[in-house]
Image (cartoon, rainbow, N blue to C red):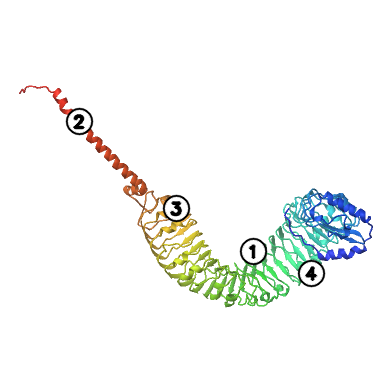
Amino acid sequence: MPKLPSPFPPPFLYFLLTLTPFLVISQPPADQTQTILLTIKQQWGNPPQLSSWSTSSPPCSWPEITCTGGAVTRLNLMNYNITEPIPPSICDLKNLTLLDLSFNYFPGNFPTVLYNCSNLRYLDLSQNYFVGPIPSDVDRLSSSLRYIDIGANNFSGDIPPAIGRLPELRFLKLYLNEFNGSFPAEIGNLSNLEYLSMPYNPLFTPAKIPPEFGKLKKLTYLWITFTNLIGEIPANFSSLSSLEHLDLSSNDLEGPIPKALFQLKNLSVVYLHNNRLSGGIPTPIESLNLSQIDLSANNFSGSIPEDFGKLVQLELLNLFFNQFSGEVPASIGLLPALTNFRVFSNQLNGTLPPEMGLHSNLEAFEVSDNLFTGALPENLCFCQRLTGVVAFSNNLTGEVPKSLANCVTVRTIQLYDNNFSGEIPAGIYTLFNLISLMISNNSFTGNLPSELGWNLTRLEISDNKFSGQIPSAVSSWVRSVVFMASTNQLSGEIPVGLTNLPQLTTLNLDGNSLTGNFPTTILSWKNLNILNLSRNRLSGPIPAVIGTLSDLLYLDLSENQFSGQIPAELGQLRLATLNLSSNQLSGQIPSAFDNLAYDTSFLNNPNLCVTTPIPNVRFCSSKTRKLDYLSPKILALILVSAALLFFFTTVLTFFMVRDYRRKKPKRNLAACKLTSFQR
């Protein structure tokens, strides 16, 4: 199993330490204790971490040992790389109350040898390689046991009902194993239980939360995430009067939140995200200690309660991916501790709380995919802690708050698909920590910036009203990965500096008024995947250098005024999409594209022709076809061969004719016969 940190409860340990002096001490002689420990060391293969265990010093001086009244009461061997089983002799330490063997490599089944440690109160076996089921007689462990942690092992099968027969148990940790059976309702009999943790056991048989758990009046911490829970949260959970931390996330729970759950006075953390819970948030809310509420990714509906405005300790409010409607109470913007506010993907409307960010160290503000109207709150970054503004897909209007231009902590601004207008405050483009600025589909105006912040990799400004030329200083945007500026009013020529962006993968400038030739030199487009320059007024030839962009998959130069032949070099690309339609191109289409896979790539170019029938493209003549299909080397070879053939034919004909003329007179004389003329 992976070595994972396990929560350690200092208050309980303090309680245990204060209790230790009152134990009845009955220990073997010091030399016998030393012999026991040295035997244990030998049985573990004398690990180097235990080098201090020797006859030269008394056991109570060894770093791993704690003694009380000369007797060994605590043995802490956490993270000692021990690989051998636990020896039975460990329980010869009759006064042992604490045994921590976590973060080692102990193999085998549950160590039943520990049944003989009759005074044990604290047992930590977590982060080891134990396998097999928990024994059905696990209650044979010390009746004084108050803390047991067997998390992060490979235990399987059921958790036996006997676990509920350890009457003094306060802490029960069963997390991150391979249990593939069930867990017992008898856990509800542990009347002293304060901490129950069994998350990340996804192989459990689907089961409901036993209503018996509602009897755990002293329970303060309940963590059962990702454990295959089904059904409803028991109504009697509202009786868990001591409960502070509730985490039932990432299960398959359904139904409503128990009506009185948010009336528990000590409740501080509620994680119910990633379930199928429904209904509204029950009110009144009297759990005034609430600091974290995560109800995201469920089927909740109704409005956000006004009572949330009373939660002065609330730091995190996650309500995203639900069906909440109505307005966000303005009082939420006044909460002094709020740092994370995430309500995206709901049906919320109205205006956003205008004082949001003014009274707290707001870090995350995510309200996208709702029906909000009005302006963005002006002071979101008032305390200079904000890392993100995510408000896309709403009906927000007005200008971008000027205060964001001074927000040195912000990393992403996503305002696309709204009705914003005006110019982007100049300082936003150069914010040092800004990684992505996504403001497409609004009515923003102004020119492109000459300079971008060092960390800005994604600039999306499509479907706005930006105008002017692409600045020649665009070559300084060296960290750019995505630049999308489609459907604006950009004009002028494409500067060669734009081709000097080595990390650029996506360039969309379609739907503008760009003119002139495309640069014939590409300085550094090593990673370009998408190039879309369609719907402009670009002219001149298509540069052959585009054929050197080995990563290019999408090329769209349609609806321009490009002329001349299509460079054969483009055939070297592995294009998934090619569109050169509606230009003034001429000549034969390169053989690499002369097939039906590109049947819509060359439309509305009257002077283009093909040798393989493609709809709406002229068919080349046979002569042209033969010549175009043959490369210059092959043509030269054919011409040389033809010349040689002509030469040899001529020579051969000459000798044949000469030989014929020499033989003809002899043959005629020998065969001559005179015949007199008769009428």
Q: Nearer the viewer, residue 166 or 28?
A: 28
Identity, as a three-letter code, of the amino acid under mark 1: Phe
Closer to the eye: label 3 or 1: 3
* Circle 2 residue: 660
Contact between marks 4 and 2 (CB within 8 A): the answer is: no
Q: Are marks 3 and 1 in contact (CB under 8 Å)?
A: no
Judging by the rendered image, the residue that carries numbered circle 1 is: 321
- Residue farthest left in this picture: 679
Circle number at residue 266: 4
Please identify, in this view, whether the residue under mark 4 or under mark 1 is nearer the observer: 4
The disc labelled 4 sits on which kind of residue? Asn
Quadrant housing residue 663: top left
Of the image marks 3 and 4, the number of the one nearer the N terminus? 4
**For this view, does 282 lie left or right of residue 514?**
right
Residue assigned mark 3 = 572
In whole angstroms, how far apart are the C-alphas of marks 3 and 1? 46 Å
Asked if 241 appears above or below 330 in the picture, the reply is above
Q: Amino acid at mark 2?
A: Tyr
